[in-house]
Image (cartoon, rainbow, N blue to C red):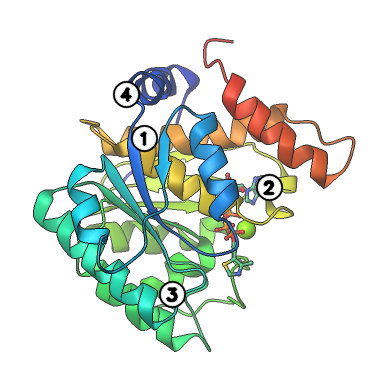
Amino acid sequence: MPTVKSFKTNQATSFIHHVKQQRPLVHCITNDVVQNFTANILLAIGASPAMVVAEQEVAEFVTIADSLLINIGTIHSNIATSMLLAATKAQQTQTPWVLDPVAVGPALNYRTEIAYQLLSLKPTVIRGNASEILTLNGQNSSAKGPDGQDSTQSALNAAKELAQKYQTIVAVTGDIDYVTNGNNVYSITGGDIALTKVTGTGCSLSAMVAAFIANSPDPLSATASACFMMKKSAELANKQQGLGTFTVSLLDQLSLFNPSL
Ligand SMILES: Nc1ncnc2c1ncn2[C@@H]1O[C@H](COP(=O)(O)OP(=O)(O)O)[C@@H](O)[C@H]1O
Ligand SMILES: Cc1ncsc1CCOP(=O)(O)O
Ligand SMILES: [Mg+2]
């Protein structure tokens, strides 16, 4: 049984600098709710976002991108075709890519089926909340839409099994984030409950993971570093003035983030 190791600030530092130095081009096929927020979060951490979605151009764009994000939040049949084309190309070109399986679970069978098809195309990382990870591992979950209803502790075994089954990295996020490749497990504590009251924080974290794993020799630590940066930035963000200010302040804190402080 792998032990859980707490992921420390000094482990995240080089990965945070790496994103700023490399300015990775992150190809995003994400949902309609979070397009603008995701692009701004990627810019704030020093990455370069590109929302390229047409089925006629996704495969070609994967060949020039440094990484790919696929998020099924507002999936429909046209965009599903684009997602499958992009992920197929990413597998061929060994472009690292992240799957965010938004809201897979009971009563949402179409997206759950597409998520399984995407899984067979070998994502480098799956980032989801506990309910989504339990569902992908074939277990019961309390999911009702995009917000997770289960604790990450209850999904830790599912995360490890999923990582082993698909030879991937799983980041299951919530009160405590766990990041595992099936052998090693990192935990990241902290953050703030306000992160769950603003739409798109999980989706944007998945985009950050895509930026962090671009050209990275250690995608496990890169993924944990992205989770660390989001939690710590939320701790630093202004929560006194309401959720609007918090959202802007989160962007501020991500853009000003200095892991050495
Ligand atoms: N109860 C909580 N306390 C602190 N941080 C949280 C809590 N729940 C989620 N987060 C943080 O919110 C961000 C989004 O995660 P999550 O809510 O799990 O994603 P999703 O939006 O996909 O459900 C992550 O950085 C996670 O660590
Ligand atoms: C509300 C909503 N509905 C479909 S996708 C989406 C955004 C979910 O964003 P997040 O999972 O990051 O909270
Ligand atoms: Mg959420």
Is residue 32 shown above or below 194? below
Q: Amino acid at mark 3?
A: Thr
Q: Earlier in the sequence, mark 2 or mark 1?
A: 2
Does the closest atom of ligand 1 sit within 8 Å of the Cβ of label 1?
Answer: no
Mark 1 or 4, closer to the camera: 4
- Do we see residue 185 in this rendering? no
Q: Which residue is mark 1?
A: 212
Give the spatial CA distance, label 1 vs label 4. Answer: 10 Å
User: How far from the left and from the top, in percent, is residue 227?
Assistant: 49, 39
User: How far from the left and from the top, in percent, is residue 181?
Assistant: 28, 48
Give the spatial CA distance, label 3 vs label 2. Answer: 22 Å
Mark 3 or 2, closer to the camera: 2
Q: Earlier in the sequence, mark 2 or mark 4?
A: 4
Q: Earlier in the sequence, mark 1 or mark 4?
A: 4
| Residue 245 placement, left or right of 159 | right
| Residue 231 placement, left or right of 116 | right
Q: Amino acid at mark 4?
A: Gln
Q: Amino acid at mark 2?
A: Leu
Q: Residues within 10 Å of mark 2 (few under 14, many from 20)?
A: many
Q: Which residue is mark 3?
A: 135
